[in-house]
Amino acid sequence: MSSVEQSIEVDVPVRTAYDQWTQFESFPQFMDGVEEIRQLTDTHVHWKTRIAGVSREFDAEITEQTPDQRIAWRSLDGPDQAGVVTFHRVSDGTTKVMLQLDFDPEGLVEKVGDKLGLVEGRIKGDLERFKEFIESRGHESGAWRGEVDQDPT
């Protein structure tokens, strides 16, 4: 497994940054290679991606969600990955968004891309585009304030 950690400060309150991140269907607007995300249930989302000419579809499960603090997930099929995004109050109008992604690169192209730091660069770019997206709006496009308790198993 490989692991990538990136963070960025966004000039919006924690609640605004968190609420926007819960709007998974907006991810294609700031995540490179994400073509579509459909929210199937409160805890299941379906992803369609196209990265380096490779199209994939997979389902992911939200394994933990605490409003204004964290969202954790893992893939259920397709690429083996899990991650967590956390939200930290810097000031009333500034939030630090931290993203950690653990993944298992598949095939030679993904393994080489991982070794060259391409995944880390993609995530850094996604966070920079999220910053631009949310700051230009100034408010979230929606919100889901429910909680998902971490499965103890």
Image (tube, rainbow, N blue to C red):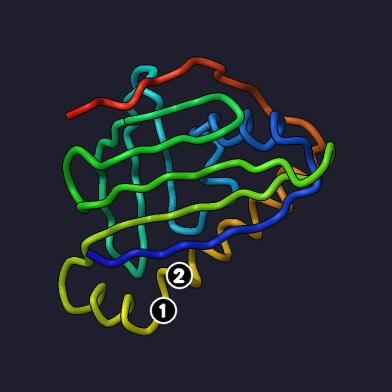
Residue 147, percent from left and from top: 46, 18
Residue 38, percent from left and from top: 40, 29
Q: What residue is shown at x 36% (from left), y 57% (from top)? A: 50
Q: Nearer the viewer, residue 41 or 48?
A: 41
Residue 89, percent from left and from top: 72, 41
The kind of residue on which mark 2 rests is: Glu
Q: Nearer the viewer, residue 50 or 75?
A: 75
Query: Which residue carries the number 2 mark?
Result: 120
Left or right, 145 with respect to 151, comes to right
Please identify the residue farthest to the front as the structure is shown.
Answer: 152
- Quarter of the image containing the C terminus? top left
Left or right, 14 with respect to 81, comes to right
Residue 105: mark = none
Other-residue count near label 1 (Cα within 10 Å), few / some / many at <14 / 14–19 / ≥20: few
- Tell me whether the residue at label 1 lies in contact with that at label 2, contact meaning CB atoms closer than 8 angstroms: yes
Residue 93, percent from left and from top: 84, 40
